[in-house]
């Protein structure tokens, strides 16, 4: 808003100073005409003229210099439009003078002065408009030195206004020196024509026309003003004569020089415009290929962009892109698949090595081989391999109907494109892989949660025994399982199992095991029968090479006996309170899933023993006995037995804590490389 | 790390396993046995004297061939196991399903017996 108000104020000032100029200049002229000393000082019109210039100067500065929307052609258009208005008004005045003919009024010096002042006002307005516009063009690509040079020129011109403001005695030497300085500075500044390069073909033609008309207006305005000035000067020496005005003269010369230079530069740039435009398009295309690697885009779109950009960059008549990796695919442009296949076959038949075969690592221009192919409209062919991670994934072939249609420049460009496409595809694949990994990790997390939730939170309790259990899995999802189930008031089933393998499948098998345990144990079947049935149930779901080791216990608190069957699980560690001995049970048994037939029955055995108060039973998975320390030693069975022997008198929970703390201090690391599970049962 | 060597002796294919078999290296063991079967050997001897450790995945490889060998009448005998490795086989009950000999001599005798 402030800028707008400023612009309005400056315009008002311009109008007022111009009216003042007209008034004072006519007064001075009239006074001198009748040989009278004028009532006002003779330098006042000159001062007002300079104030008028200053107002307009800042008016355009505010209006044009900071308008970001204007482009080059807009600027030229503004200058042209201002010139047009000035010229039309001036011509209209000329018409009025012509109509007045040789009347008294037409020859009156006051009337001529008025016409002259209108013309001067219009011309100055036009010149300042052009000056501001040219400033923007010159400073389009500015350097520090250019800015300083321009500042010197601009402020020098403004200071020169002072020289003309008052009736200083005219010093010929200084006058000439100033004019020459400004002329030379303007000439040097006019060398800055970088903006021309950014015009496209159409804009250049428009620019030429606008500049031509601008030059015409300049010449007309100069001619008109000087002709009026010479008429007036014949009548009176005292009037606002611009002919000795340094500012106006410098401005006229600068604006004219720059207009002419611009016109010539644009004119001579016309023939090379297409090259520049093409280069610009190449850059844009290159960017498109690089940016084509975005989440929503596919490899296919990269291929399409490559095909499209290559064709447009070298003006090919047709092209195809043959992808030979994973799945074969042919992308074509302006050519049928049959035609492409014919050419491929033809080249293969003539044993043209290195163009369309996989082994090619170089770009080849093999146009001469094409000339022997009959019935083909194409006479030039250029082929490029596309590499992803040093692997040739396809070939881009470009075709032209002209013989020798490709030059070295084109080869370079398309080669860059195909390289970039290769990089894009590589990036694309890497990103997809990363996404896949992320998804896999997420799945593992879910599986881990599932596995955790499969383990019981509360274990069965009885007056005859207490149970403590612990399970910790490594980073990956493990397959350790333990559970308890009360079958009747005096019977409780216990299970510990270890699913071979890790990951999501292990968690699935574990959940199957839980289902089997809860459904089979309910019926209070014999432990051996449990294993046989569990094996039968698992055979169909376990994949080749995987199995589940387990031990099932049936604790009878009434008879104080335990019946159990071992299915390939780690042997039970037992403390006999009566004999005060720690030992592993030595019994045979085969893991579930090892034998996939009814023959399993032959290997399943139920054993029985009775427990006494103070007995301790330790169940565990192989993660405990196979845990290694820094030296590569295994934790082993002996260490486990020793812990039990030392802590036999403690509670189940305490024995378990002892085992785990000893294990952690043995392995000397925080990270687990397997699943650790223990279940300690202490009998009362 | 695992290293697997194969050589032929008296019409039997001797597969020597050197090192440790874990989840990743078990694939190599599987490949070696599959190759031997593919080449038509009916007597396969597995030399475990340099086998330091075998994980459940490695045991799964031996396990997975039990039925196939029965169908194709292929005899496989493992020999030279350290006590520790033998224990892992025993715990899972694989010693009841596979033929395990003390040394090569015993293994050869066992395999000839099995063939009859």
Image (cartoon, rainbow, N blue to C red):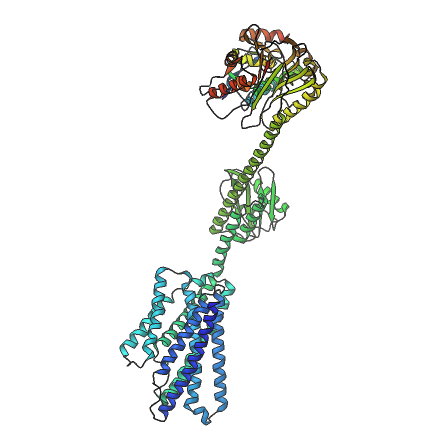
Q: Quarter-wise, where is residue A27 in the image?
A: bottom left
Give above or below for A91 relative to A550.
Answer: below
Q: Residue at x 36, y 80 (%)?
A: A47
- Seen from the viewer's position, the closer of residues B9 and A552 is A552
Number of dots carrying numbers? 0
Place of residue A429 in the rendered image (x, y in percent of width and height, measured from the top left): 55, 39
Place of residue A565 in the rendered image (x, y in percent of width and height, measured from the top left): 65, 13
Q: Residue furthest top?
A: A579
Q: Residue furthest front?
A: A463
Place of residue A606 in the rendered image (x, y in percent of width and height, measured from the top left): 66, 10
- Seen from the viewer's position, the closer of residues B113 and A367 is B113
Place of residue A355 in the rendered image (x, y in percent of width and height, measured from the top left): 53, 42
- Seen from the viewer's position, the closer of residues A133 and A193 is A133
Q: Quarter-wise, where is residue A395 in the image?
A: top right
Residue A364 visible in rendering:
no
Q: Residue at x 46, y 69 (%)?
A: A63
- In this picture, residue B72 sits left or right of residue A382: right
Residue A8 visible in rendering:
yes
Give above or below for A109 relative to A444.
Answer: below
- Where, quadrant-wise, is the C terminus of chain A in this rendering? top right
Q: Quarter-wise, where is residue A170 in the image?
A: bottom left
- Seen from the viewer's position, the closer of residues A506 and A474 is A474
């Amino acid at each position: 808003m402030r800028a707008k108000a400023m612009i309005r104020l400056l315009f008002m000032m311009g109008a007022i100073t111009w009216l003042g100029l007209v008034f004072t200049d006519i007064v001075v002229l009239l006074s001198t005409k009748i040989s009278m000393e004028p009532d006002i000082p003779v330098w006042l019109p000159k001062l007002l003229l300079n104030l008028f210039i200053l107002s307009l100067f800042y008016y355009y500065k505010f209006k044009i210099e900071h308008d970001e929307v204007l482009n080059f052609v807009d600027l030229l258009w503004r200058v042209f439009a201002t010139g047009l208005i000035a010229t039309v008004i001036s011509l209209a005045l000329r018409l009025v003078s012509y109509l007045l003919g040789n009347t008294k009024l037409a020859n009156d010096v006051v009337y001529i002065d008025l016409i002259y002042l209108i013309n001067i006002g219009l011309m100055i307005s036009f010149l300042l408009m052009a000056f501001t516009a040219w400033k923007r063009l010159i400073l389009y690509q500015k350097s520090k030195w250019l800015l300083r040079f321009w500042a010197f020129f601009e402020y020098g011109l403004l200071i020169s206004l002072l020289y003309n403001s008052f009736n200083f005695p005219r010093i010929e030497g200084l006058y000439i020196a100033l004019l020459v300085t400004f002329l030379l500075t303007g000439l040097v500044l006019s060398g800055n024509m970088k903006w021309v390069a950014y015009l496209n073909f159409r804009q250049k033609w428009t620019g030429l026309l606008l500049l031509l008309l601008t030059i015409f207006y300049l010449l007309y305005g100069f001619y008109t003003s000087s002709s009026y000035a010479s008429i007036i000067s014949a009548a009176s020496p005292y009037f606002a004569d611009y002919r000795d005005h340094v500012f106006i003269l410098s401005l006229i010369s600068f604006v004219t020089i720059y207009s002419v230079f611009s016109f010539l530069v644009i004119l001579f740039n016309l023939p090379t415009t297409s090259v520049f435009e093409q280069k610009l398009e190449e850059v844009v295309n290159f960017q498109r290929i690089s940016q084509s690697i975005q989440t929503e885009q596919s490899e296919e779109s990269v291929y399409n962009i490559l095909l499209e950009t290559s064709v447009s960059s070298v003006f090919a008549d047709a092209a195809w892109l043959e992808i030979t990796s994973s799945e074969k695919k042919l992308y074509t442009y302006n050519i049928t698949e049959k035609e492409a296949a014919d050419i491929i076959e033809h080249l293969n038949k003539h044993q043209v090595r290195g163009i369309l075969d996989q082994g090619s690592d170089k770009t080849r221009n093999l146009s001469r081989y094409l000339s022997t192919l009959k019935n083909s409209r194409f006479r030039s062919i250029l082929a490029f391999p596309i590499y992803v991670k040093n692997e040739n994934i396809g070939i881009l072939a470009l075709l032209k109907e002209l013989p020798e249609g490709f030059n070295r420049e084109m080869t370079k460009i398309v080669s860059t494109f195909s390289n970039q496409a290769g990089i894009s595809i590589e990036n694309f694949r890497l990103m997809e892989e990363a996404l896949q990994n992320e998804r896999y990790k997420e799945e593992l997390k879910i599986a881990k949660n599932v596995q955790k939730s499969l383990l019981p939170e509360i274990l069965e309790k009885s007056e005859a025994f207490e149970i403590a259990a612990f399970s910790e899995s490594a980073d990956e999802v493990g397959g350790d399982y333990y559970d308890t189930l009360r079958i009747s008031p005096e019977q409780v089933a216990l299970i510990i199992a270890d699913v071979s393998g890790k990951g999501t499948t292990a968690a699935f098998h574990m959940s199957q095991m839980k289902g089997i345990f809860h459904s089979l144990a309910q019926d209070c079947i014999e432990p051996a029968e449990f294993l046989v049935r569990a094996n039968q149930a698992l055979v169909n779901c376990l994949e080749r090479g995987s199995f589940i080791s387990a031990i099932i216990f049936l604790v009878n608190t009434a008879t104080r006996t335990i019946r159990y069957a071992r299915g390939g699980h780690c042997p039970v560690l037992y403390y006999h309170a009566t004999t005060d001995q720690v030992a592993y049970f030595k019994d045979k048994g085969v893991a579930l899933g090892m034998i996939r037939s009814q023959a399993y029955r032959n290997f399943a055995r139920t054993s029985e023993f009775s427990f006494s108060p103070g007995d301790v039973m330790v169940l565990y998975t192989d993660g405990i006995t196979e845990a290694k320390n820094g030296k590569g030693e295994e934790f082993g069975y002996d260490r486990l037995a020793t812990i039990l022997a030392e802590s036999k008198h403690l509670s189940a929970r305490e024995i378990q804590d002892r085992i785990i703390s000893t294990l952690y201090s043995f392995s000397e690391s925080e990270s687990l490389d397997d699943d650790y599970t223990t279940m300690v049962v202490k009998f009362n | 790390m695992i290293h697997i060597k194969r050589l032929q002796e008296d019409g039997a294919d001797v597969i020597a396993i050197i090192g440790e078999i874990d989840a990743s290296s078990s694939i190599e063991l599987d490949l070696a046995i599959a190759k031997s079967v593919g080449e038509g050997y009916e007597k396969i001897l597995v030399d475990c004297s340099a086998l330091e450790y075998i994980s459940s995945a490695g045991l799964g490889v031996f396990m997975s061939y039990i039925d196939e060998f029965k169908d194709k009448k292929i005899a496989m005998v493992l020999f030279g196991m350290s006590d520790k490795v033998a224990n892992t086989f025993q715990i899972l009950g694989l010693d009841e399903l596979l033929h395990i000999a003390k040394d090569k001599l015993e293994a050869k005798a066992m395999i000839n017996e099995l063939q009859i």
